[in-house]
Amino acid sequence: EKFSSVCIGVKGSGWGWLGYCPEKDKLAIATCQNQDPLQLVHGMIPLLGLDVWEHAYYLQYQNLRADYVDAFYNVIDWANVNERYEKARAAAGH
């Protein structure tokens, strides 16, 4: 729910991210404008990203970004996200 609201709320072009914060050993949700990289902007390792630039959804969803975000959950490979999380934690020594 929080991930959805953050992604829907991105102003203009950008990305919504679920990332791992090695310093705090926890997951966090963040946004990045345009093409700014998550790791440099927030110091987090990306686990799951959603492109919310209009080019990603406009042809199918027009200006209904919320519908696009809802549909995103139907294609997430949660096993892959979990694998990325475990690798990120191990690399951070946790």
Image (cartoon, rainbow, N blue to C red):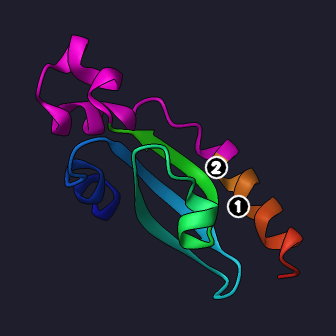
The residue closer to the viewer here, 67 or 79, is 67
Q: Residue at x 69, y 43 (%)?
A: 80
How far separated are the C-alphas under marks 1 and 2?
6 Å
Residue 36: x, y in percent? 50, 52
Locate the N terminus and report the quarter of the image it occupies.
Answer: bottom left
Q: Is residue 22 above or below residue 63?
A: below
> Is residue 84 toward the left or the right of residue 15 in the image?
right
Residue 43: x, y in percent? 62, 72
Question: Which residue type does callout 1 highlight?
Answer: Tyr
What is the number of the mark on residue 14? none
Locate the C terminus and report the quarter of the image it occupies.
Answer: bottom right
User: Where does label 1 land, which residue?
Assistant: 85
User: Where does label 2 land, which residue?
Assistant: 81
Provide the residue span drawn in magenta: 53-80
Crowding at mark 1 (Cα within 10 Å: few <14, some 14-19, many 20+): many
Residue 3: x, y in percent? 34, 58
Element marked by disc 2 = helix
Element marked by disc 1 = helix
Q: Is residue 28 above or below residue 31?
A: below
Question: Which residue type does callout 2 highlight?
Answer: Val
Does the segment drawn in magenta span residue 57? yes
Query: How many labels were placed on the picture?
Result: 2
Q: Residue at x 22, y 19 (%)?
A: 58
Q: Furthest residue to the left?
A: 63
Residue 44: x, y in percent? 62, 68
By secondary structure, the bulk of the magenta-drawn segment is best described as helix
Q: Are marks 1 and 2 in contact (CB under 8 Å)?
A: yes
Q: Is residue 27 above or below residue 2?
A: below
Does the segment drawn in magenta span residue 1? no
